[in-house]
Amino acid sequence: MINKENKTIFDKLLIHDHEELIFCNDKKLGLKAIIGIHDTTLGPSMGGTRMWNYATENDALKDAINLSRAMSYKSSLAGLNAGGGKAILIGDINLKSKKYIERYAGFINDLGGKYWTAQDVNMTTQDILWIKNVCPYVIGLPKEYGGLGDSAIATAYGIYVGMKAAIYQITGNNSLENKKVCVQGVGKVGGKVVDYLIKEGAKVYATDINNKNLDNIDEKNVQIIEKDNIFDVHYDIFSPCALGGVISMDNLKKLNCKIIAGAANNQLEDDINVPNELLKKDILYLPDFLINAGGIISCYHEQINQIDLQKVMQMTETIYDKAIDVFKYANENKITTHSAAMKIAVERIERNKKKSN
């Protein structure tokens, strides 16, 4: 039994059978990066690069490990022939420059296609194009550069159809009309989720720490809520679309909703206590790595050179049926939806491991 308070790096890798962690460093440029490759059984690992000024390097390591694992499960559940990876750039975004990004791209290139990257938190389209200057293992490109364009379109659609599956599970009707939905974070993805909800006649509430994002939806039929007052209203659906960790044991004491369905990665503070508490409170949780897969579905189609947005959206729409399957699996096995989604994802990976042996 590994002591949770004193794990070595290899202990952390062994917990979820990670394949690799790559540490990248360039002192002159201030570049410190971690690339996590969780599992490549189904295919090359894929996952975005994010940049964050972490309080500690251990926090960055934790993110690289957790996010790359989530990408494995996300790709597996979505039915993709792809594994899970994630890259973390440690530091303030002011460190970024063309030289900095191209140096980082060189480290990706050294992996020879085992890891394909895309845009994530604090990374721009320009950064992705600079990576493309150095290595071919980059996806999520603009249309004018041979890509499918904004993957947030597919991500938001997956959240929307996931919400419809959850409402159907509870009511037997998948309409979101007149349902109260709170979208926490209305940036690239959350803003598009709001559009889908308004179009269907939902009663939408929104909050964001960035006032510019709120300004973008100001003219829409949306009620803005101060972030400190977010738990004062009863919702049919609470949709976390910002950073992770928002569903904590403390917040669950205040949260009053029937369904949690959002785009943020790693929404749960932990994978055991929080899902169990959600089950006790009879809150239907749609695992983030199930319903926010639209983005990786789009990127995967680029990776296999199938530049067809219609096919991307058709595959994203299957998230509805996959969510219903997860609910059924959870009910039949008397486990949380989080555990059910993980088990379904892992089972597909394990089946493919057996085939290759």
Image (cartoon, helix red, strand yellow):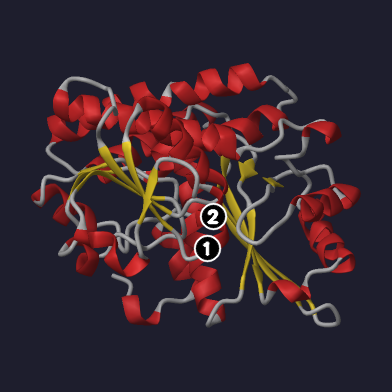
Image height of 29 relative to 254, above or below: below
Query: Can you tell which quarter of the image residue 325 is in?
Result: top left
Which image quarter: residue 147? top right
Residue position for label 1: 211
Q: Where is residue 62 in the image (x, y as percent from the top left)?
A: 48, 68
Q: What residue type is labelled 1?
A: Asn
Q: How crowded is mark 2: few (under 14 residues within 10 Å), some or many (20 or more)?
A: few
Front residue (pair 81, 357): 81
Query: Which residue is depicted at the point 46% across and 49% down?
Result: 70
**Judging from the image, what secondary structure is the residue with disc 1 in?**
helix
Q: Residue at x 49, y 37 (%)?
A: 156
**Is 250 on the left-hand or right-hand side of 30?**
left
Q: Nearer the viewer, residue 218 or 255?
A: 218
> Viewed as shown, does residue 13 lie left or right of 342?
right
Tell me if mark 1 has few (under 14), some (14-19) or many (20+) residues whose alpha carbon lies within 10 angstroms of its own. few
Numbered mark located on residue 215 in the image:
2
Measured as percent of width and height from the top left, residue 229 is found at 28, 65
The percent position of residue 95, horizontal first and vertical second, equals 77, 75
Percent x, y for residue 256? 17, 53
